[in-house]
Image (cartoon, rainbow, N blue to C red):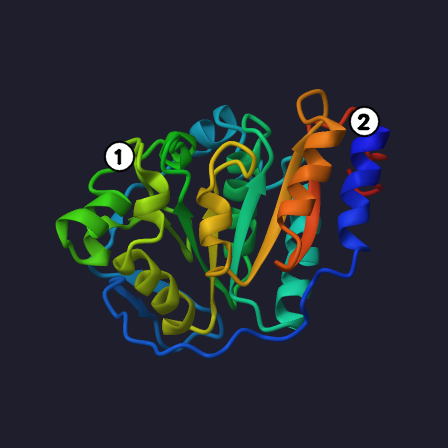
Amino acid sequence: MEKIQKALEKSLGSGQTDPSSPAKRPAGLNGTGRQPATGTGSLDIAYTSTRVTPVHDQKLERHRLMAGIERHALSDTFRMLRTRVLNRMEASDYRTIGIASSVGQEGKTLVASNLAISLAKVLTRTVLLVDLDLRSPSVHTYFGVDPEPGLLGFLNNGLELSQCLVNPGIERLVLLPNGRPVHNSSEVITMPRMLQLSKELRDTYKDRIVIYDLPPVLLTDDALAFMKHIDCCLLVASEGRTKEDQVKKTISLLQGYPLIGSVLNRSSETMPRYYGR
């Protein structure tokens, strides 16, 4: 575990993060079905055409989405991750982030989902979580929502984006799920309609953070093919699952892309008990 941790820490000090902001892209997408409520200091969103499927605390806890449960002991862990991610993104005007891993089953979707929930609790931000792991989509299973028509409904069937989004009953959070595995995923992930969507998602609402749950870097070319269309990346490794050489190879492949941090999932280290608990 210590070797994996050192490899992850090296990624933060390697100087590969590009502090320059991406070029501004033309906005044009206005089909998310959200309307900001007036008369409040926070971004209270009323979803007019996006499907709303409330997820109860019992289901959140069963699927380990602890960031959505107030006073849960682990919610502070994701608040800390949220603050560090948000600080680094705001410093470079980043609005989109990819959550990546090396070989799969390392907890990247769990981290992406909890981070999305925690970021949505910031009153001045809205969050869109996109399931871009096309060969093994699973965002919908964590939230317990129907993934159809989802991302492929937008890409292949020409549906409006608002028809494909789901609000899981958490304020300021919207999901773009996908429930149908795709074998020609690298072709789909780089099709013109997907690339145009990624551009417009970034620029339509300046308060929004877009999180992409990416495929494992070492198993397909999908993540690397799409990486240049994302502002920055967060790498997830798992104690007992990810090997040191896999982390090093992943970091090497991500060289040149803004890697803003890393998460060691399933760590055996324990945090001191919070003084207020």
**Image point (41%, 77%), residue name:** 25
Is residue 176 in view from this perspective? Answer: no
Q: Which residue was labeled with disc 2?
A: 1
Q: Is residue 109 above or below residue 58?
A: below
The residue lying toward the viewer, choosing from 17 and 220, is 220
**Image point (53%, 35%), residue name:** 110
User: Are there few (<14), some (14-19), or many (20+) residues within 10 Å of tag 1?
Assistant: some
Is residue 86 in view from this perspective? Answer: yes
Q: Position of residue 176 (x, y in %)?
A: 33, 48
Q: Amino acid at mark 2?
A: Met
Q: Which residue was labeled with disc 1?
A: 146
Q: Is residue 253 above or below residue 192?
A: above
Q: Amino acid at mark 1?
A: Asp
Identify the secondary structure beneath mark 2: loop
**Image point (68%, 32%), residue name:** 246
Q: Position of residue 16 (x, y in %)?
A: 72, 60
User: Are there few (<14), some (14-19), or many (20+) residues within 10 Å of tag 2?
Assistant: some
Mark nearest the camera among 1 and 2 is 2
